[in-house]
Image: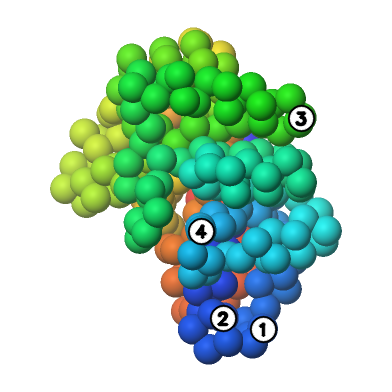
Amino acid sequence: MTRLSVNINKIATLRNARGGQTPNVLQFAQDAERFGAQGITVHPRPDERHITTKDCYDLFDQIQTEFNIEGYPDARYLQLIKNLRPAQATLVPDPPGVLTSNAGWNCTAQAKFLEPIIAQIQELGVRVSLFIETNLAQLDTAKAIGTDRIEFYTGPYAANYKTDKSAAVLPYVLAAQHAQQLGLGINAGHDLSLENLAFFKTQLCALDEVSIGHALIVDALYLGIENTVQRYLYELR
């Protein structure tokens, strides 16, 4: 079964636009869990324009499902992982100021940087996932430097889905087969939606987890939180 982790960054964005605690990030996360989500994802960026460091601590104390903290592995992020020890740390190659994650790691070029960080996080008992694209050589390097899982950057799939969904998903099918042969767990995220999720899931040989935020929050505006979470779970089934 593919697990649904709800990325709640956009709830924090909406809260921060007005100040105060409405909408309440913790309450939304707890409601998402109550409605069936199997994980909560956050991406606390250095400027705290959405999820803040305080949010991470508040969530860790209260949520009951898997907690996934995404981020660029700088000293600030690594200290947060050390203090909280979430179920999963997803490392993304975002430089400061980037709007959203829009590329995967070049593991080959960054191997010497990533390998000791992966080991450091794993020593804390935290699973490590690398945000990555579908290049098979990059998957080989990801395995060699010790990561537990990879998270496919699915932006290109979503962008090309309406034009030719079979062609759009093919690189992910091949990469997932390769990752499975290497013994890597497989996550996916970025622009997955009610429109394209089921096809993506059914085409891959294995898919442990999807992390979905923007599309799910937008759908919740029209459908309600409970109905939206249930519909995403239905698509994954």
Query: Would you say residue 2 is visible in this rendering?
Result: no
Of label 1 and label 3, which has the lower sequence position? Answer: 1
Q: Residues within 10 Å of mark 3 (few under 14, many from 20)?
A: few
Of label 4 and label 3, which has the lower sequence position? Answer: 4
The CA span between labels 2 and 3 is 32 Å
The CA span between labels 4 and 3 is 24 Å
**Residue at the spot 73% in from the left edge and 41% down from the top edge:** 82
SS class of the residue under badge 1?
Answer: loop
Asked if marks 2 and 1 touch (Cβ < 8 Å), the reply is: yes
Q: Nearer the viewer, residue 231 or 141?
A: 141
Q: Amino acid at mark 1?
A: Gln
The CA span between labels 2 and 4 is 17 Å
Q: Residues within 10 Å of mark 1 (few under 14, many from 20)?
A: few
Disc 1 designates what residue? Answer: 21
Q: Amino acid at mark 3?
A: Gly
SS class of the residue under badge 4?
Answer: loop
Disc 4 designates what residue? Answer: 46
Q: x, y (%) of residue 161?
A: 25, 47
